Amino acid sequence: MMALQKIKILDLTNDPNFVDTEDGNKVHELVATAFERGDNVELSFVGASQIITAFTNAVIGQLYNEFPEDMIKRKLKIVDVPEGFGGTIVRSINRGKRFYENKDEIGEIMSHYEG
């Protein structure tokens, strides 16, 4: 049976400033593990006083490298986003989709500059 896992980010970060990529990676791991089990996730941003895209890229953007977009839409519900921060989350979703859709092409371009 499919379960609903509620993840309150503030409980994991113990800091209302959601700015640390390491914290974002911890939250991401919980979401990804729940998806792998087939669970739905309710991700709560309650209590956040600051949210930056580096954090939301780590939490949400990476999901688009691991799971199909339609699955993410079905299984992830983002709640309790403080006013003024919705755009930050939307940007991470859009960047994640764009980046991982084109990751082979981006890797090829980058290899020309690294080599």
Image (cartoon, rainbow, N blue to C red):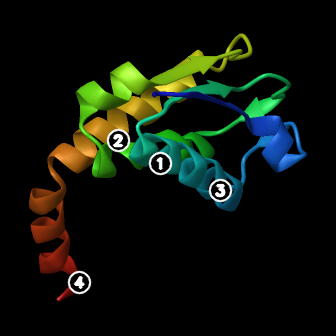
Q: Residue at x 32, y 43 (%)?
A: 64
Q: Earlier in the sequence, mark 2 or mark 4?
A: 2
* Residue carrying label 2: 96
For marks 1 and 3, give the CA distance: 10 Å
Q: Is residue 24 left or right of residue 68?
A: right
| Cβ atoms under marks 3 and 2 closer than 8 Å | no
Q: Earlier in the sequence, mark 3 or mark 2?
A: 3
* Residue carrying label 3: 26
Q: Looking at the rendering, which quadrant does residue 115 occupy? A: bottom left
* Residue carrying label 1: 32
Q: Residues within 10 Å of mark 1 (few under 14, many from 20)?
A: many
Q: Earlier in the sequence, mark 1 or mark 3?
A: 3
Q: Is residue 20 left or right of residue 3?
A: right
Secondary structure at badge 2 equals helix
For marks 4 and 3, give the CA distance: 30 Å
| Cβ atoms under marks 2 and 4 closer than 8 Å | no
On the image, the x and y values in percent for residue 83 come to 72, 10
Q: Residues within 10 Å of mark 3 (few under 14, many from 20)?
A: some
Amino acid type, callout 4: Glu
On the image, the x and y values in percent for residue 42 come to 60, 24
Q: Residues within 10 Å of mark 2 (few under 14, many from 20)?
A: many
Amino acid type, callout 1: Ala
Vertical comparison of 15 with 4: above or below: below
